Image (tube, grey):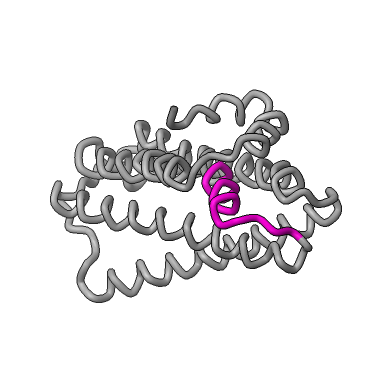
Amino acid sequence: MILNHLWGFYTAPKQEWQNVDKKHESYFYVLSHILIISLIPAGMAYYASAHLGWDIGAGATAETVKLTQASAASMAVAMYCGLLFGVSALAVLIHQLAKAFDAKPNYTQSLEIAAYTATPLFMSGFSAFYPELWFIMMAVLVGVSYSVYLLYTGVPIMMHIPEEKGFIFSSSVVTCGLVLMVILMVLSVILWSLGLGPQHM
């Protein structure tokens, strides 16, 4: 069943990583997990931008800003593709980094780490039901923190390496993840400068 590890990662993450390690899923199963979980932030971004609107300003000067449905849809599709690219690229980096730590995972195992680690961050997309910037930033911060915790917890188990090596490995992955995020942000700015930015109502 798709997403059947989701509850376990929130209630008993170490045990759930051990369950994943004992019974590795197929490549298409993990890919299905990514395809579904990436819909949450992209879909919620569309809904919040096109239907709920964002409050810009404070107090009496606050103004609700909405995007046209076409613009919100195109940005949601771009966001969805960016998330899929980010997780896939992170899996490739994990796979390549493993060689330096005497670990020999296959690509599917690396994709499992990337996919399940990214899940709490993507789940924070539900915060867009309340499109206030401070609330969403708090939710994203919680999601990022738990994703990093899952990474540090899961790497030693999935890679079969000591915790000391796992800590260094995980720190390297976090650094690579930050670099990927910056790359995606730069690409977004470039696309906006080419006239593909949002269109307001």
Between 50 and 184, the residue placed more toward the observer is: 184
Whether residue 22 is situated above or below residue 111 in the rendered picture: above
Q: Which residues are magenta?
A: 103-117
Res 84 seen here: yes
Instruction: Identify which residue is drawn at 28% across, 39% down.
Output: 48
Res 58 seen here: no
Instruction: Identify which residue is drawn at 55% across, 63% down.
Output: 92
Task: Give the dominant element type of the magenta stretch: helix, strand or loop.
Answer: helix
Instruction: Identify which residue is drawn at 29% across, 71% down.
Output: 191
Quarter where residue 128 is shown: top left
Magenta span contains residue 111: yes
Whether residue 179 is situated above or below residue 62 in the rendered picture: below
Between 79 and 131, the residue placed more toward the observer is: 79
Whether residue 118 is situated above or below residue 14 in the rendered picture: below
* Residue 14 percent coordinates (x, y): 72, 33
Quarter where residue 84 is shown: bottom left
Number of callouts in the render? 0
* Residue 61 percent coordinates (x, y): 30, 44
* Residue 200 percent coordinates (x, y): 17, 54
* Residue 46 percent coordinates (x, y): 26, 44
Left or right side of 82 for 118: right
Quarter where residue 34 is shown: top left
